[in-house]
Image (cartoon, rainbow, N blue to C red):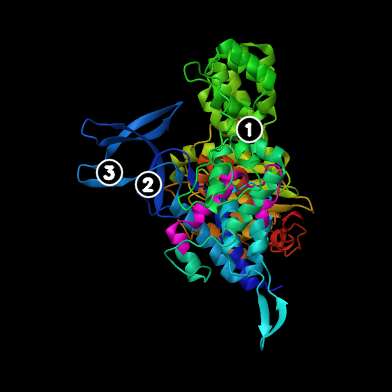
């Protein structure tokens, strides 16, 4: 092992920053990027739409969520160069759907920094991340591992072979080739790895690290070989290739084959993909040239009744149904009912389509309503929280919100084992207005924790315990009802109010402060006297009301415990909440408390260190 505390401290900080990062590396709709020094990448992306003017220019509108609808706000005119201007002022740059290259490059730089600190740790990190849910990070780590310079070279001395170096590119290959339900990389993500490596700034990073020979030409490392193996395995297992076609990945698989110049062993490969072959200019192709392929299945000539019969007979998944539906018919009540009753939809499909199902009046059908409610009750992520905004029924909205609450609680149940959390909320005069901003964030955050191990107080010069009666949005809103900002600031009173909720001997404790850190004096003695023995402080700053370097950080330093920020933007992306919580808790230093008592809980670094390097499947 080459790891040292000096190396892994900065590495852990980098990893935690990545896990808590809330922007997306891929946007599937058009947007505008504008300069914003408050973000890590210096840019902010917002969704837009446009209309074409008579002179060929395009008027661009930013889309802002207002209640249940998107409001269109005109921001300027776009010319052929993609720049959006209002008069002579440049507003931003138009972006087509796809990769956000600046975010991808920022991710890649962070991985490179960890690599420079410790090569083996970076490889173990990639192995650990493969089993996690953060797809953007997995793509970047796979890309990096496929090109980094430790690739099993022969180590020699005086012309004599001594041993072979570590081959960490094998880890990248394993990430491409391994199958693990819900965690492996689908064809679109495999193609995205290449897209990431093709970004000019990333090509430059690879060149600076000695991975590639040019800073202008992208270096793909072992990506082509790994994808070739991936394609060969699926050609040799026809059912797998057919499954990819049925799942809607036909054109993506074709694009992968083009990019690596894949040469199949038989014409069946082209037939399954319905891929008609033409001779190349250099005449190199010798398989299936000019051979007709089976036409793609089409429902263009079917009426609504025939489509319903086809759904009941073939039971295609919802994505395939949408792809086959003639535009002149579209999704009708009968077609939607047939798809639901024929079990063509997953629970996730049912949650996503709840507003449409409601619009079609199908929630009045008892059997369908029960299926939708069952899907909501078994929600695996917080998608339902977003869907709730788009339904009219108050009862259904509440069930969707409850499903989102349950999903978050399930996602963090394991990481919160043997941890007790104390929320200390500033309600002093300086929090007027800001407290209202804080409440919805606190509501979402608190839903993530087991109710019997979370305690909340508010304080000004007096501390008061809030009683959360139910682990839900409604329960939190009720607890904060009547809480108003006013008075002075004394953090110690908020801690003293919670001192009666002593942790169990086997429990770690975490303090989460919500406020503006407006007090000048530290409150070390109050923490020590409380008996709550925090292992770390977390800070949830309220936008526009933050005094960095104040009393909370000072107190943490005096106690010798870590202090972390929680980005308020996390709560704008419900999918990031669980991941951020896991990163926050897992990355606190083990064994450092106000009492010096040792901890049994495993830190993020230790979890990564204990992870075996991914191994390629036997067939590879």
Say what secondary structure mark 2 lies in.
strand
Q: Residue furthest right?
A: 505
In the picture shown, does residue 400 fall above or below 484?
above
Characterize the magenta stretch by its predominant secondary structure: helix
Q: Write the start and end of the magenta stretch as one range.
A: 174-203
Pick the front one: 490 or 611: 611
Q: How far apart, in angstroms, are the residues tagged by discs 1 and 3? A: 38 Å
N-term mark: 1 or 3: 3
Q: Nearer the viewer, mark 1 or mark 3?
A: 1
Q: Position of residue 299 (x, y in %)?
A: 56, 20
Identify the mark at residue 33; answer none if there is no mark.
Answer: 2
| Residue located beneath label 1 in the image | 246
> Residues at badges 1 and 2 in contact (C-beta under 8 Å)?
no
Q: How far apart, in angstroms, are the residues tagged by discs 3 and 2? A: 16 Å
N-term mark: 1 or 2: 2
Residue at x-position 26% and y-position 47%: 90
Other-residue count near label 2 (Cα within 10 Å), few / some / many at <14 / 14–19 / ≥20: some
Q: Position of residue 410 (x, y in %)?
A: 70, 39
> Residues at badges 1 and 3 in contact (C-beta under 8 Å)?
no
Residue 456 in sight here: yes
N-term mark: 3 or 2: 2
Pick the front one: 548 or 225: 225
Pick the front one: 557 or 609: 609
| Residue located beneath label 3 in the image | 80
In the picture shown, does residue 567 fall above or below 368?
below
Q: Position of residue 564 (x, y in %)?
A: 57, 56
Pick the front one: 251 or 430: 251
């Amino acid at each position: 092992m080459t790891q040292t505390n000096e190396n892994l401290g900065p590495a852990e900080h980098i990893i935690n920053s990545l896990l808590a990062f809330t922007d997306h590396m891929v946007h599937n709709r058009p947007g505008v990027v504008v300069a914003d020094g408050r973000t890590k990448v210096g840019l902010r992306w917002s969704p837009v739409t446009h209309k074409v003017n008579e002179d060929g220019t395009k008027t661009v509108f930013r889309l802002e969520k207002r209640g249940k609808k998107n409001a269109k706000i005109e921001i300027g005119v776009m010319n052929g160069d993609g720049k959006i201007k209002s008069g002579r002022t440049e507003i931003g740059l138009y972006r087509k759907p796809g990769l956000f290259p600046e975010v991808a490059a920022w991710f890649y730089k962070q991985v490179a920094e960890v690599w420079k600190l410790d090569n083996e740790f970076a490889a173990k990190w990639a192995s650990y991340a493969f089993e996690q849910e953060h797809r953007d990070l997995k793509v970047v780590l796979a890309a990096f591992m496929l090109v980094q310079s430790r690739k099993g070279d022969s180590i020699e001395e005086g012309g004599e072979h001594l041993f072979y170096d570590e081959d960490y590119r094998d880890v990248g290959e394993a990430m491409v080739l391994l199958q693990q339900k819900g965690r492996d990389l689908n064809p679109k993500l495999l193609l995205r790895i290449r897209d990431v490596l093709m970004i000019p700034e990333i090509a430059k990073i690879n060149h600076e690290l000695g991975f590639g020979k040019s800073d202008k030409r992208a270096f793909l490392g072992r990506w082509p070989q790994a994808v070739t193996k991936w394609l060969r395995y699926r050609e040799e297992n026809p059912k797998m290739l057919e499954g990819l076609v049925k799942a809607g990945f036909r054109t993506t698989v074709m694009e992968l084959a083009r990019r690596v110049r894949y040469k199949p062993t038989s014409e069946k490969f082209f037939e399954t993909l319905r891929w008609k072959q033409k001779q190349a200019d250099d005449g190199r192709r010798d398989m299936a040239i000019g051979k007709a392929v089976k036409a793609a299945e089409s429902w263009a000539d079917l009426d609504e009744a025939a489509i319903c019969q086809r759904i009941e007979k073939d039971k295609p998944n919802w994505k395939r149904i949408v792809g086959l539906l003639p535009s002149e018919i579209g999704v009708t009540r009968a077609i939607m009912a047939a798809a639901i009753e024929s079990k063509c939809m997953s629970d996730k499909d049912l949650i996503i389509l709840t507003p449409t199902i409601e619009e079609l009046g199908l929630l009045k059908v008892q059997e369908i309503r029960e299926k939708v409610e069952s899907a909501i009750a078994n929600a695996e992520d917080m998608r339902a929280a977003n869907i709730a905004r788009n339904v009219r029924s108050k009862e259904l909205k509440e069930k969707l919100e409850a499903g989102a609450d349950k999903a978050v609680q399930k996602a963090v149940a394991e990481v919160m084992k043997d941890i007790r959390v104390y929320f200390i909320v500033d309600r002093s005069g300086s929090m007027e207005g800001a407290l209202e901003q804080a409440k919805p964030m606190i509501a979402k955050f608190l839903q993530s924790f087991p109710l019997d191990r979370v305690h909340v107080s508010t304080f000004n010069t007096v501390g008061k315990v809030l009683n959360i009666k139910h682990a839900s949005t409604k329960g939190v809103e009720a607890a904060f009802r009547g809480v108003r900002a006013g008075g002075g600031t004394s953090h110690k009173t908020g801690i003293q109010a919670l001192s009666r909720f002593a942790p169990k001997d086997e429990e770690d404790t975490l303090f989460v402060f919500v406020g503006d850190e407006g007090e000048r004096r530290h409150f070390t003695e109050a923490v020590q006297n409380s008996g709550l023995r925090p292992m770390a402080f977390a800070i949830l700053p309220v936008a526009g009301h933050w005094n960095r370097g104040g009393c909370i950080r000072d107190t943490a330093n005096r106690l010798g415990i870590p202090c972390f920020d929680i980005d308020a933007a996390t709560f704008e992306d419900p999918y990031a909440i669980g991941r951020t919580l896991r990163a926050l808790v897992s990355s606190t230093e083990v064994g450092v408390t106000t009492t010096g008592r040792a901890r049994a809980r495993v830190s993020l670094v230790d979890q990564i260190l204990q992870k075996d390097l991914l191994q390629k499947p036997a067939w590879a």
